[in-house]
Image (cartoon, helix red, strand yellow):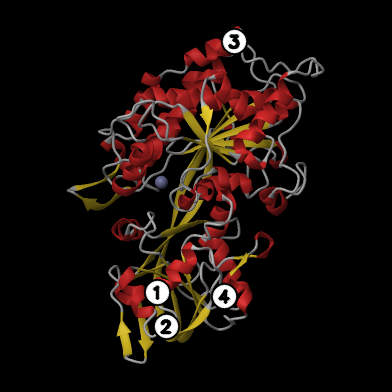
Amino acid sequence: MVLGIALLALVSGCGGSGSAPERQDTSLDGPAVRSALDAIRGDLIRQHMSTLADDKLEGRGLGSAGYDGALRYVETTLKSYGVEPAGEGGTFQQRVPLRNSVVVEDKSSMKVTSRAGTRTLAYGVDYMLGGDQLREQVAIDNAPVAFVGYGVSAPALGYDDYANAVSVEGKVVAYLSGAPPSLPSNERAYFSSGAVKDAEAAKRGAIGTISFTSPDDPRFRWDVSVATSKQGSFAWIDAQGQPSRGDPALRGSASLNHSGVAALFAGAPTPLAEVFAAAAASRPQAFDLPTRVSLATSTTHRDIESANLVGRVKGSDPQLQAEHVVYVAHVDHFGRGVAMNGDDIYNGAHDNASGVAVVLEIAHAMTTLPTPPRRSALFLFVTAEERGLLGSDYFARHPTVPRDSLVANLALDMPFLFHPLLDIVPYGAQHSTLLAPVTRAAQHLGIGLAEDPIPEQVLFIRSDHYSFVRQGIPSLFIKSGFKTGDPALDGAKINAAYRRDVYHKPNDDMSQPFDFEAGAAHARLNFLTGWLVAQETARPAWNSGDFFGALFGETPTGTH
Ligand SMILES: [Zn+2]
């Protein structure tokens, strides 16, 4: 329990000293903080979730009336709590222009040529293509393929699939999704990112990418991926009209079902079973495949308008009020899509009506304080998280408040509300000074801290906090641990069953057995953590030598 030991040292270090600056009151026992905590109620979280996940809002899809209705509900609620607007032009809104790229399936194709001849794969059965953000027609003709393991080059962490000198110049690279289990949880998440892998491959001269999944990867749900891919991929558009994603060097990107992998590895020098075993054992690997591939991708582009909402509770300290602790939750979900069991509305009750509801109640609690915290609190409700963290990325790169005023981020996304909150996994805490306030807040509420129990889910890159991490801002993403307090409720099993059977499907609706008090507990914990960050004179900072701090952090006051 490495984390546990570090926690103890930090906690005993921050309580005792009496030399804190005069105005830095971080006592959690005062009547104002206590009554703010009492103002956080499970029934209000239930009410917000029920409204946002109602069929009337049609799953809050991008560009839909349902999404606009959800934003109106959030804005009305913020106003009723006395939160002030902090978006563009004195409003709550920040406009986010998006581009939607949808693959025209019957004008697209993938062919694999082996010694046995050329096979045309079936779209949606054997493979899928990523829509090209930049071009309507793009193709790769009969190119050689190099298999590059996980496609991860992390020599500083002792792992490099590219170390054995297989050239990928002019080739399509095929890589396994995920990253080596030997890497620490959040570093593993970073290197599992398709964007990081594609950039690495492109840097080395690759012309296309193919990803596939080991048969025992719990994230692999082909039917759900096919269903959501019908809605295409998205990017935000900059002032020059350029999309935020897409690399002109890469002329095709495919993902494969198991049948497609078998076709690609026909005649491979190493059998697939050995490839998967090496990957599971974190052994780097790369070799040329004897197959060649052709990819033709036809894409339609459509520009749509979406928006984030930004509210603010102004801080009380004349200096520190110019700085912001940012809470974020995504409003969007998949809207109406491919029907499953006769239901085509992807309500997104847990993902992420729950997080929006929790952040609304954190804002509520902040406004009940007779004296606001010293720093200001920003409440950010974002679009297009489900499409690659786009709304939060847009905000973190184009904030409606000065960029250097963003001192920390706390994200709420599917906090996991299926049992009482007895312990938490604070993703990101080990990288920065945010470990101390989240530990204090948890201890105050009698909540334990746990190590990441599901590193294979690579959660650290999977929600909006990561957009802030990439801009060098220390961040926390707090999820429930697996303790339930009830021998009849197995937290690990409930989590796995949700991810397998409900996540990103139309049955993520209000019929689930939510524990709204766990939602209230998440709100209290995040409220207290953010309040401590807002009270403390010292600005949060990355730990010295930290992986993410070194990669993205520069200096806390650096310019971008
Ligand atoms: Zn989601």
> Compared to 336, does 48 lie above or below?
above
- Mark 2–mark 3 distance (CA, rounded to whole Å): 67 Å
Few, some or many residues within 10 Å of mark 1 (<14, 14–19, 20+): some
Where residue 265 sits: x, y (%)?
A: 39, 79
Q: Answer whether labels 2 and 1 touch (C-beta < 8 Å).
A: yes
- Mark 2–mark 4 distance (CA, rounded to whole Å): 26 Å
- Mark 3–mark 1 distance (CA, rounded to whole Å): 61 Å
Is residue 187 visible from the viewing direction of this image?
yes
Q: Amino acid at mark 3?
A: Ala
Q: Which mark is residue 464?
A: none
What quarter of the picture does the N terminus occupy?
A: top right
Badge nearest the viewer, 2 or 4? 2
Question: Of callouts 2 and 3, which one flags the residue occurring earlier in the amino acid sequence?
Answer: 3
Question: Of callouts 4 and 1, which one flags the residue occurring earlier in the amino acid sequence?
Answer: 4
SS at circle 4: loop
Q: Which residue is mark 2?
A: 268
Badge nearest the viewer, 2 or 3? 2
Q: Which residue is mark 1?
A: 272
Q: Which residue is mark 4?
A: 249
- Mark 3–mark 4 distance (CA, rounded to whole Å): 57 Å
Few, some or many residues within 10 Å of mark 4 (<14, 14–19, 20+): some
SS at circle 2: loop
Where residue 93 sits: x, y (%)?
A: 52, 37
